[in-house]
Amino acid sequence: GAAISAHAARDYAKMIHDMALRRELIQLGVEISDNAKTFSVDLEPDQMIVAAESKLYSLAESGTAERGFVPFLQAATEAVISANLAYQREGALSGISTGLTDLDKKLGGLHPSDLLILAGRPSMGKTSLAVNIAFNIARAYKKGERQDGTYGTISGGVVGFFSLEMSSEQLAARILSDAAQIPSENIRRGDMNEAEFRRFVEAAKELETCPLYIDDTPALPIAQVAARCRRLKRTHGLDVVMVDYLQLLRGTGRADSRVLEIGEISMGLKAIAKEL
């Protein structure tokens, strides 16, 4: 009798949950329809699509379009679970390894919801460092059962790389240059001996299944970056997003100055990190 009652209770809970989701979907449909019917100079159709996609993604992932307030008990429980996992690691990295030991020691690895800005003067190697980190993470990618019993990324990660300055081909050449240990200028000029060229081809074969996804669309608006990240997360998974570089992104066009626009873009990137 107890087993039947428990089964019935689960079915009832699922029915309630499904009804709530249907209500949310209906409400979202009404909002999309109302927004589309209302003409506004400030609200472009592209922005409406991005906003709708964001809500639909949240609904699909968490079962509710708005997270809202979370009871302290729930937040504290999640914090205790996280601390327990950290304790079990006995000082090991808590985040995704960058593949660079000294940087990992400083950061403890890359953590979910983090926004990290890599800054420096021109030609100091910012792109090279970003490419190296992206490559290290994607190359180390493995899936399996995590310590908390869930299934997902256990090593490395799926990387989305927005290359607003270089083409995807140029970026791939830099990655292969590092992997094959051949200077990129030699590859560009074709100045390689037979052994080096063979090494280059072998590196390309080895990285065929590497989960590194490159988007080289120039001058992307921050809202489009968010939409494309959600799509990648939904289709292939997503653990780390790289943007090279921040100043080449565009805001909504409403900011009065470039300083405010850069602030808006930075906030948009932080929002993407927290959401995904």
Image (tube, grey):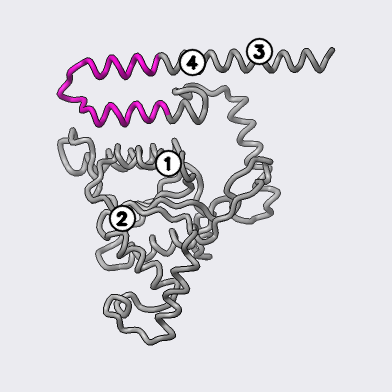
Could you say which quadrant of the image residue 2 lies in?
top right
Instruction: Name the residue tied to disc 3.
Output: 12
Label 1 Cα crowd, 10 Å radius (few <14 / some 14-19 / many 20+)? some
The amino acid type of the residue labelled 4 equals Arg
Contact between marks 1 and 3 (CB within 8 A): the answer is: no
The amino acid type of the residue labelled 2 equals Ser
Could you say which quadrant of the image residue 46 lies in?
top left
Q: Nearer the viewer, residue 198 or 84?
A: 198
Q: Dot 2 lies on which element? A: strand
Q: Position of residue 14 (x, y in %)?
A: 62, 18
Contact between marks 2 and 1 (CB within 8 A): the answer is: no
| Alpha carbon distance from label 2 to label 3 | 49 Å
**Which is more foreground, mark 4 or mark 1?**
4
Residue at (31% x, 59% y) in the render = 168
Magenta residues (range): 27-56
Instruction: Name the residue tied to disc 2.
Output: 163
Q: Quadrant of the N terminus?
A: top right
Instruction: Name the residue tied to disc 1.
Output: 273
Label 3 Cα crowd, 10 Å radius (few <14 / some 14-19 / many 20+)? few
Instruction: Name the residue tied to disc 4.
Output: 22
Q: Is residue 35 magenta?
A: yes
Residue at (48% x, 15% y) in the render = 22
Q: Earlier in the sequence, mark 4 or mark 1?
A: 4
Label 2 Cα crowd, 10 Å radius (few <14 / some 14-19 / many 20+)? many
